[in-house]
């Protein structure tokens, strides 16, 4: 029996992806560096299934029909290179290798070049949805060799999540397009998670609301235009009670956020191409500051400030908070799409942003009801620079900005940090300013560095000897 598809790497993602492919009627070859993991997988989950385990990479390769279709679900970075180094030399021309891990896009570009030397078809594919998604239907963001994609399209489409506009799987473009889209997906995920954390903090610290009351608010928001996976799980998190203490479990969790690096990459990517993604950046920095627990504890006894209480009409504040959160969440997507558009131009991806929005509608962590309207906005205007310029997002900005401004003022007055919400307020206010104070920056650059400047009244490049009258 030969396998239709191969999976290398049998940690949670690889195991579940292998089972997902097998569930769709394919025979799947599986291999893992450490033999014991494969054996455990076969014993616990492989009984009676069309799975072919191998304990040598050469055996795994031999168990696949040609052209071989192999996905790697191994730790990103060095481990992926280590596997590819062995794998490439065992394969035949035109076999298809898919990296389904969270690779950095520059690594994907480098690996594509290497694969070409072996005449292999290489795909960099972002897979989102975590453990559950991998098993029941992830969002799949593919890029790389187009012919290779055509040959695995049927399998990938069958295992993908199904959204309101079809299977959440698409080919986005050559090179590292798929991994770039997945990277920005994760950046948006960071920004939305931070926004939710800020709303939780304002309610909990500012309004002294109980976990149950906050769960009700998130539940209500999740039945509105804000409906999305991350709001849904936040309600569930707030309802969970710690069996040991009887307290809400979330309150028993140490306030130090970890990260694996994709939010940082997304921000670095935005900086590399001069794309404005301040909210994603602030979300990364918020995690960095959270990690400085000892420093924060010390500073809390040294630096004074307001006590965090927000004394106001709770109903009105919650209404305003909804407005602030809604605008911030839309802005997280808007900044992400802007970055994708800039990267597409810069790196030649030819991304279709309506397709990106469509693929994010199900299976992935940032799936949300509003993506349907975002997909439509980009279908209507493929080069739309910012979502807020068109309906319904323009109207949301118009209606909600006053409430958002009140939240920012009250948060600062109470001494509660709201970096994501704040960054969006500044971002949109800057973006909608026909004139910004950058003229002063240009004057300063010219003053100390003779960097020259342009004038508003005539063409040309100018330099002033500022210290000479
Ligand atoms: N977990 C998620 O929710 C999630 C979501 C989306 C994408 N991803 C991405 O999907 C990929 C797999 O994620 P995961 O969480 O299932 O597993 P992981 O912890 O990222 O990686 C574990 C796998 O990598 C293998 N590995 C590690 N070092 C290796 C090396 N030097 N040589 C060969 N194999 C090596 C391990 O083999 P051994 O058993 O031999 O150690 C194991 O199969 C990653 O790239 C991850 O970033 C994960």
Image (cartoon, grey):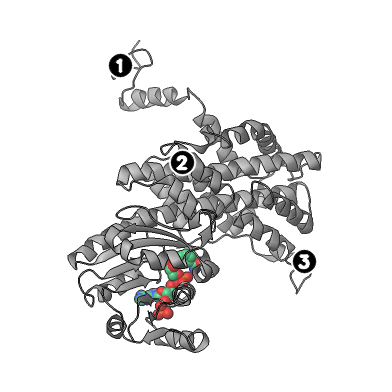
Q: Quadrant of residue 53?
A: bottom left
Q: Quadrant of residue 121?
A: bottom left
Q: Position of residue 19 (x, y in %)?
A: 47, 77
Q: Position of residue 339 (x, y in %)?
A: 42, 44
Q: Which residue is identified by label 1? A: 459
**Closer to the eye: label 1 or 3:** 1
Per the rendering, the mark at residue 247 is: 3
**Closer to the eye: label 3 or 2:** 2
**Sequence-earlier tag: 2 or 1:** 2
| Res 350 seen here | yes
Distance between mark 1 and mark 3 Cα atoms: 66 Å
Identify which residue, 119 or 218, lies in the foreground. Answer: 119
**Sequence-earlier tag: 3 or 2:** 3
Side of 65 relative to 317 (left or right): left
Distance between mark 3 and mark 2 Cα atoms: 45 Å
Identify which residue, 287 or 117, lies in the foreground. Answer: 117
Identify which residue, 145 or 451, lies in the foreground. Answer: 145
Q: Which residue is identified by label 2? A: 378
Quadrant where the image shows the N terminus: bottom left
Say above or below: 1 vs 370.
Answer: below
Asked whether mark 2 and ligand 1 are closer than 8 Å, the reply comes as no
Side of 434 relative to 81 (left or right): right
């Amino acid at each position: 029996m030969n396998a239709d598809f191969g999976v290398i790497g049998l940690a949670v993602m690889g195991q579940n992806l292998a089972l997902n492919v097998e569930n769709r009627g394919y025979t799947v070859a599986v291999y893992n560096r450490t033999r014991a993991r494969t054996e455990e997988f076969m014993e616990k989950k492989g009984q009676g299934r069309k799975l072919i385990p191998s304990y040598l990479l050469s055996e795994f390769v031999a168990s696949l029909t040609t052209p071989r279709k192999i996905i790697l679900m191994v730790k990103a970075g060095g481990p992926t290179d280590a596997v590819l180094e062995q794998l490439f030399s065992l394969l035949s021309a035109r076999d298809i290798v898919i990296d389904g891990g969270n690779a950095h896009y520059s690594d994907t570009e480098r690996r594509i070049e290497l694969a070409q030397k072996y005449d292999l078809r290489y795909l960099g594919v972002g897979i989102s949805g975590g453990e559950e998604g991998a098993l029941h239907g992830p969002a799949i963001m593919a890029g790389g060799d187009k012919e290779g994609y055509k040959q695995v399209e049927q399998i990938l489409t069958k295992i993908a999540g199904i959204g309101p506009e079809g299977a959440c799987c698409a080919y986005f473009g050559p090179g590292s397009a798929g991994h770039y889209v997945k990277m920005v997906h994760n950046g948006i995920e960071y920004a939305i998670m931070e926004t939710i954390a800020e709303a939780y903090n304002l309610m909990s610290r500012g309004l002294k609301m109980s976990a149950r009351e906050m769960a009700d608010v998130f539940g209500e928001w999740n039945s509105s235009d804000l409906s999305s996976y991350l709001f849904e799980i936040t309600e569930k998190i707030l309802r969970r009670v710690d069996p040991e203490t009887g307290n809400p479990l979330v309150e028993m969790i140490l306030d130090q956020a970890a990260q694996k690096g994709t939010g940082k990459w997304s921000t670095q990517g935005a900086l590399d191409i001069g794309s404005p993604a301040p909210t994603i950046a602030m979300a990364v920095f918020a995690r960095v500051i959270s990690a400085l627990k000892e420093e924060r504890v010390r500073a809390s006894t040294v630096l004074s400030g307001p006590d965090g209480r927000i004394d106001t009409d709770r109903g009105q504040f919650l209404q305003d908070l909804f407005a602030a959160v809604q605008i911030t969440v839309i802005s997280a997507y808007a900044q992400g799409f802007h970055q994708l558009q800039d990267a597409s131009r810069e790196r030649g991806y030819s991304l279709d942003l309506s397709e990106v929005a469509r693929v994010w509608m199900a299976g992935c962590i940032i799936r949300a009801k509003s993506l349907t309207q975002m997909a439509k906005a980009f279908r209507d205007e493929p080069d739309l620079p910012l979502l807020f310029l068109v309906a319904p997002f323009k109207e949301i900005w118009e209606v909600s900005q006053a409430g958002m401004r009140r939240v920012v003022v009250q948060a600062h007055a109470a001494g509660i940090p709201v970096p994501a919400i704040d960054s969006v307020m500044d971002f949109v206010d800057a973006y909608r300013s026909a004139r910004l104070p950058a003229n002063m920056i240009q004057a300063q650059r010219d003053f100390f560095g003779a960097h020259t400047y342009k004038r508003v009244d005539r063409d040309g490049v100018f330099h002033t000897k500022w210290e000479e009258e």
